Amino acid sequence: MTEFLIHSKRCFIEGQFIEATLHIKNQSIFDVYNSIHLVDGLEFLDVDNSIVMPGIIDAHVHINEPGRTHWEGFETATKAAALGGVTTLIEMPLNANPVTTNVEAFKIKQDASKNKLHVNCGFYGGVIPENSNDIEGLIKAGVFGIKGFLTHSGIDEFPNITKEELEAIAPILKKYDCPLLLHCELTDDDVPKVNNQKSYQEYLKSRPQHWETNAIDLALEIQKKFDIKVHIVHLSASEGIERIKKQKLESSNLTVETCAHYLFFNAEEIPDASPIYKCAPPIREKHNNDLLWEYLLNEGFNFLSSDHSPAPPEIKKLENGNLFEAWGGIAGLQFTLPVIWTEGKKQGLTLEKLIPLLTSQPANFLGLENKKGRLKKGFDADITIWNENEAFEISEKMIAHRHKATPYLNHKLKGKIIHTFVNGVQVVEDSSLKNLNMGKLLLKNQNTDNADYYELN
Ligand SMILES: [Zn+2]
């Protein structure tokens, strides 16, 4: 049992910064007092002017365990998450082996996570050709959504699906109000011939905007036809924005995210022969990314994520620099907040706009809005404390991901995470891990209306 107080002159409560004292008891926020408030016998943590906010919820993470634990595992990923102020993450149905496309594989993944969760972790299931009969079981077993690819996923055991296959599962998704998450790229041959496989510009041209917009059109069509929840993951193509905007006016069941790397890097600055920057869809040109920022500032994105998707250096082809052979995926789980904040400050982003995009808004998407994502009486005590003006440089030593390779290495960022609390227990103190194994496995509750989720272990 834990019971203590946290005081700050800047607690982020109901969309604004106020001086407050949080009373934490067991795993929850027992009470929120205005201003400074002492309670006899209770430990009092005064963080003065540091920001106290709800823990970050990263709704797009690839952990790869079991089967590809040498790429990334629960132990390392959730330590990195805690150090980055992430208190809940939702794990994608690939690139572990087996992929999470049936209940048996889902149970295997849950077992693999046991005693390795340093932050809370939930899961998505996957749709592939010929698993339409497994979707209902996955939903009932507690996944937070069903993810599918409209182009090759990079993993042979997770093939892409067709429009017909999506239409076949739409009624099941509708029945449970379960989100369909789509990787939107629709491949065609309308791309230039590649001459130099180490050229970033040639890689960029090999995955054009129209691949994304054609896939988005398909996603919008399915959303409209069945009135189901459709979520477009990692939007990179700014040409997709107008059509998404238009349909969002008609339906609240359409949601869209973008990721830290699309907001931080620009294609013009990416050197050739550097697959560390490779992801799909690709990081595009500055003029494109400025439009993503404009959409973000106009509150178009539902939330932001890391799409943390690492691989070992040999699979990232870091030595030979071949962008077409390299694994596509960027490691960045630990740095989402300072990365977006550092660039965001230049773009005119305020903290009041940024914090909900990482906390209450992903909670809304996941159906966790009654327990997580806000500092409120009765909510889970998942809390991140940081200083937005403190600068630091990313060094290999501080990276807790399984592999140190990340395009953020050596970047100077603003916004240092100081303390992280998961379920009322301090897991990070003064930017170092303190208590381990405090995370819970989260399963979405599809069976009753009286709880958002239930927890194992
Ligand atoms: Zn992803």
Image (cartoon, rainbow, N blue to C red):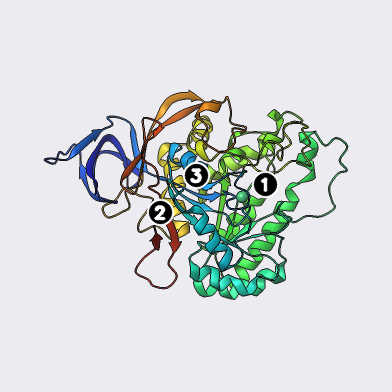
Which residue is depicted at the point 44% across and 36% down?
A: 83
Can I make out residue 254 in this image?
no
The quarter in which the C terminus is drawn is bottom left
Whole-percent x, y for residue 195 in the image: 88, 37
Which residue is depicted at the point 62% across and 75% down?
A: 133
Circle 3 residue: 75
Q: Which dot, 2 or 3, sits closer to the camera?
A: 3
Circle 1 residue: 237
Instruction: Residue 325: name its quadrant.
Output: top right
For this view, does 393 lie left or right of residue 212?
left
Whole-percent x, y for residue 231 in the image: 57, 58
Find the residue positioned furthest to the left.
Answer: 40
Above or below, comparing residue 26 to residue 43 in the picture: below
Query: Gap between marks 1 and 2, in whole Å?
Result: 35 Å
Circle 2 residue: 440
Can I make out residue 323 in this image?
yes
Question: Tag 2's secondary structure?
Answer: loop
Instruction: Residue 275: name its quadrant.
Output: top right
